[in-house]
Image (cartoon, grey):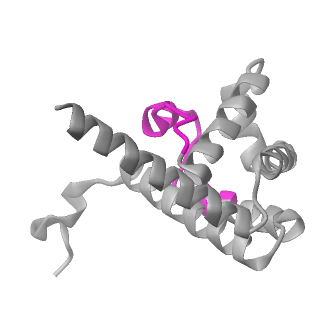
C-alpha cells in the first residue's frame, strides 16, 4: 500500500514538474496569471453584454472571485491543485447566462491574450484551454439530450 501511495505521489509530482517546465518555457509564471486575470476581468466589467451578467452575480464579491480565478488558472497551468472548486455548479443558475455569451467571453479572452501574452505559444495554450472550458461549461449547462432524440429531429 505504501509503495502504491509513494508511486502515485511521484506521478503527481512529475506531472506538476512537466507543467511548470512547459509554462516556464512559454514565459508563464504566477505574475502572468495574476495579470491575465486582472486584465481580463477589468475588460469583462467594461463589456456591454458580459459586464452586467458578471457584475449581477459577483457584486460585492469581486475580490474573492478574482482570487478564485487566479487559483483556477494557476491550477490548470501548473497542475498545482490550487483550485478546488466546482465550475459547473458555480455557473448553474446564473441569471441571464446564455450559450451565446461564451463566444463573446472567448473573443474577449483572446483579445486580452493578444495584448499581454508573452508569446504566441502562450496565447495558443491559454486559448485552447479556454475553448475547452467554454465547451465543457456550455455542454454541462445547456445541452439537452432530448434534442438528439431521433423523434425530435425534423424529417
Between residue 13 and residue 138, name the one nearer to us: 13
Between residue 62 and residue 99, name the one nearer to us: 62
Q: Please give the name of the residue rendered at 76% of the width and 78% of the height, measured from the top-left corner.
A: 120
Query: Would residue 97 be counted in the magenta stretch?
Result: yes
Between residue 148 and residue 152, name the one nearer to us: 148
Query: Would residue 59 be counted in the magenta stretch?
Result: no
Instruction: Tell me, yes or no, if residue 30 can be seen here.
Output: yes
Residue 75's x, y, as percent? 57, 44
Instruction: Tell me, yes or no, if residue 100 can be seen here.
Output: no
Q: Please give the name of the residue rendered at 83% of the width and 42% of the height, measured from the top-left corner.
A: 45
Q: Please give the name of the residue rendered at 37% of the width and 40% of the height, measured from the top-left corner.
A: 9
Residue 116's x, y, as percent? 87, 63
Residue 29's x, y, as percent? 76, 52
Query: Left or right: where does residue 52 sit relative to residue 141?
Result: right
Q: Residue furthest front?
A: 3
- For the stretch drawn in magenta, what is the main secondary structure? loop
Q: Residue furthest top?
A: 60
Looking at the rendering, in which quadrant would you find the C terminus?
bottom left
Q: Relative to 46, does residue 24 appear above or below in the rendering?
A: below
Query: Left or right: where does residue 139 sit relative to residue 99?
Result: left
Residue 114's x, y, as percent? 83, 71
- Image: magenta residue range: 80-105
Number of marks drawn: 0
Q: Please give the name of the residue rendered at 43% of the width and 55% of the height, measured from the top-left corner.
A: 136
Amino acid at each position: 500500500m505504501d509503495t502504491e501511495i509513494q508511486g502515485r505521489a511521484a506521478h503527481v509530482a512529475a506531472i506538476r514538474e512537466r507543467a511548470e517546465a512547459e509554462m516556464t518555457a512559454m514565459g508563464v509564471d504566477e505574475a502572468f496569471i495574476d495579470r491575465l486575470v486582472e486584465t481580463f476581468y477589468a475588460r469583462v466589467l467594461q463589456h456591454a453584454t458580459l459586464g452586467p451578467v458578471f457584475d449581477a452575480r459577483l457584486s460585492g464579491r469581486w475580490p474573492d472571485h478574482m482570487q478564485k480565478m487566479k487559483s483556477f488558472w494557476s491550477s490548470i497551468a501548473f497542475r498545482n491543485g490550487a483550485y478546488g472548486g466546482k465550475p459547473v455548479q458555480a455557473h448553474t443558475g446564473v441569471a441571464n447566462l446564455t450559450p451565446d455569451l461564451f463566444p463573446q467571453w472567448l473573443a474577449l479572452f483572446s483579445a486580452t491574450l493578444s495584448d499581454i501574452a508573452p508569446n504566441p505559444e502562450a496565447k495558443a495554450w491559454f486559448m485552447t484551454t479556454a475553448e475547452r472550458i467554454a465547451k465543457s461549461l456550455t455542454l454541462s449547462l445547456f445541452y439537452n439530450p432530448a434534442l438528439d432524440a431521433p423523434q425530435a429531429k425534423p424529417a
